[in-house]
Amino acid sequence: MAVLHNIRQKSALIIVVIGFALFAFLVPSIIKNGGFASKNNSIATVNGEDIDRIEFARQVEAYQQNMRGNISTTQAVNRVWEQLLSQKIMEEQIEDLGIRAEKSQIRQVIKMQMSNNPQFLNKAGVFDENKLKEYIASIKQTSPQMYQQWLNYEGGLAETASQNIYANMIRAGVGATLTEGEQAYKMENNTMDLRYVQVPYSSIPDDEVEVSKKDIQSYINDHKEEFKTEASRNIEYVLFEEKASDEDKEEAKNSLNELLKNRIEFNSVTNSNDTIAGFKTTDNAEEFVNVNSDIQEPLRFRFKNQLPKEFADKLFNLEKGEVFGPYQEGNYWKLSKMVETKKLSDSVKASHILLSYKGTRAGGDRTQPEAKALADSLANVVKQNKSKFEKLATEFSDDPSAKQNSGDLGYFGPGQMVPEFEDYALNNPVGSVGVVKTDFGYHVIYVKEQTDKERAVKIATVSREIEPSETTRNQLFNEVTKFEMAAREDDIAEQAKSSNYKVRTVRNVKALDENIPGVGEQRRVVQWAFNDDTDKGDVKRFDTSTGYLVAEITEKHGKGLMTPEDASSKIIPILTKEKKAALIKEKISGKTLADVSKNQNKVIQTAKSVNLSSPTLAGAGNEPEVVGAVYALKEGETSKPIVGNKGVYVVELEKKSEAPALDSYLPFAQQQTSVRRQMATSRALDALKDKAEIEDNRADFY
């Protein structure tokens, strides 16, 4: 008590000390980020204009909501960024050029979009601009929120119209002359007949050609634009997966076996012991499964081909009440009990009319009693005259897909419909009409056709997942922690080798990457790799969905040119082909095609009607360099060795056929113009992006 009294007396002092300690803890982070006054709220800067971080985050969130969660945050960030970057660059161009969408243009777009809206049509069914003006004036007075939405809508149309004007200006500046049209015509229609000998690159073994690091660096220096790269990291990692031990598997199996037996439980209400039926003796197998199984499956009839293939024979031939198992299927131990057998059609054709109501999965404006009354009424009409079903389905059904087919659902079998619907369709004779309630609403069902009946089984299955125990998880955590500590003192690869772990290498990880090959989405690993405090050789442990990952930074590369190591996978095949081509050309001798064929022991091949537009050689594939070089030869002339995609060629031009001259090449010029204009705007935008001064801070926030 004396201690508590002293604490109360000095509480103010203690608060000050704690506050000072927290302040001291935060000071380094504050200084690192530019001091107290610095607060970077910019996700990026494009040509001197900041993009606000908060607004960007709102757009990312909205995009994810529109995608209904089927996209990761990083994917959403990248897509919003691309849209926003294009918008900013386009806006800058439009502003500089003084492009403005006039009111008349905007009104014309509105007229087109609203032309089918009944609210703005006159008695003749024609769009009435006065009605639109009345509507705008009305919401301006009565609903400021709706009026603001309308203004935003108009603003969006104005922006779109301006962008269209800019795009049309770009396209208008792109075209093809009549001379270019003539060239296109000749490239398509001038043809050549060739004879050639191909010496493939595969004729030279790879070990006869050496590509050095110096060769790769020289190629990079000569092609700098191709090998520019962002800052990147190379990572090595070891993956530790949480797996159930043999003891864990046996424990799961034993716990499942215990469910077979009856058990005694004390009932506090009756102050006596109750006997709880086990799986073997229970009269309500479905409820037992729902209470005790790790997998809840609907209890429905299945045919033999719908049972697990490995155990189908044993399961299908069980007697009523007989239990099979435990048996292992995937990562589960299972017990299965035969509940019922029956002769059923494996396929049925039916139609339905869905009548939804408020609160159902299909939604709707009706109340439940209204939907039920309408369903019963329609069912009575159909029972008296089934020919009316299609018309009623088209008029009343709330199932859009079935409504298009007059309610016809086609053929389906067990397991393809919701249980209540399926039970009616499979268990009632052809011609039956009835009303069934499901989570979607009330269905008027008409059974049209059924296949021959065969044996089906209703089997209840209790499943127990095989998963690592707490002891196993703790053992793995200790193992991973020891490895992490050892790897910090030594190279991760050496530690993994001594412990017989598999090391995986990932090269060229970029700051905004999300996935680590072999693991999947691991954004935290990438963020750590690009943290200012993370250095080459640093090691860290990360949690994964299946265990742990211990990673080490093996290389840090800044923005610039790729290293020979990172570019080697792209450059080595190119240089290998060049070196092989040089060796092949040295070996080729002879003045005629027959001489080359004999000298290289290769057959002479032919290619007919070859043109420049589609430079393909029969038996060799696409070879534009070869075809282009041969086009310059005279008939009967044989080329010198030509380096192609798949080998070195010697070609003889047998015949060249010139296409007849046309009175006008305008159609071909127009065709070329159309092709060029299709990509004009996107190419212009790409060029503007390359030219723009962009400071991208996305990786600091995501």
Image (tube, rainbow, N blue to C red):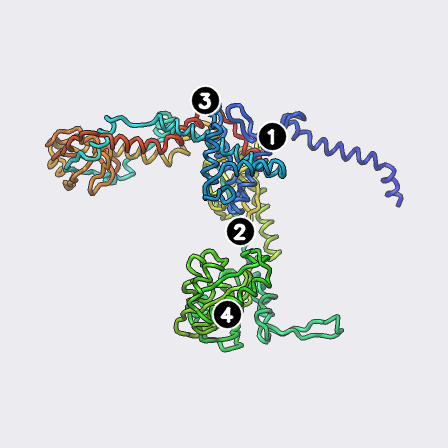
The nearer-to-camera label among 1 and 3 is: 3
Q: Earlier in the sequence, mark 3 or mark 2?
A: 3
Is 302 placed above or below 125 here? below
Residue at the spot of label 1: 41
Q: Residue at x 47, y 46 (%)?
A: 518
Which residue is disc 2 drawn over? 241
Closer to the camera: disc 2 or disc 1? 1
The amino acid type, in three-letter code, at marker 1 is Asn
* Residue 473 rendering spot, x and y as whole percentages: 59, 53
Marks 3,4: beta carbons within 8 A? no
Q: From the image, state whether disc 3 or disc 4 is nearer to you.
A: 4
Look at the numbered disc 1 and give the secondary structure of its residue. Answer: loop
Within-10-Å neighbours for mark 2: few <14, some 14–19, many 20+ = some
What is the C-alpha distance between the residues marked 4 and 2?
61 Å
**Mark 4 in CB contact with mark 2 (< 8 angstroms):** no
- At label 3, the amino acid type is Leu
Q: Quadrant of residue 429?
A: bottom left
Q: Amino acid at mark 2?
A: Glu
Depth order, front residue of 651/235? 651
Give me the C-alpha separation between circle 3 and circle 4.
70 Å
* Element marked by disc 4: helix
Residue bearing the label numbered 3: 97
Query: Mark 1 to mark 3: distance in Å?
Result: 30 Å
> Which labelled disc corresponds to residue 184?
none
Residue type, mark 4 in image: Asn
Give the residue at mark 4: 380
Q: Can the viewer see residue 555 in this picture?
A: no
Q: Secondary structure at mark 3?
A: helix
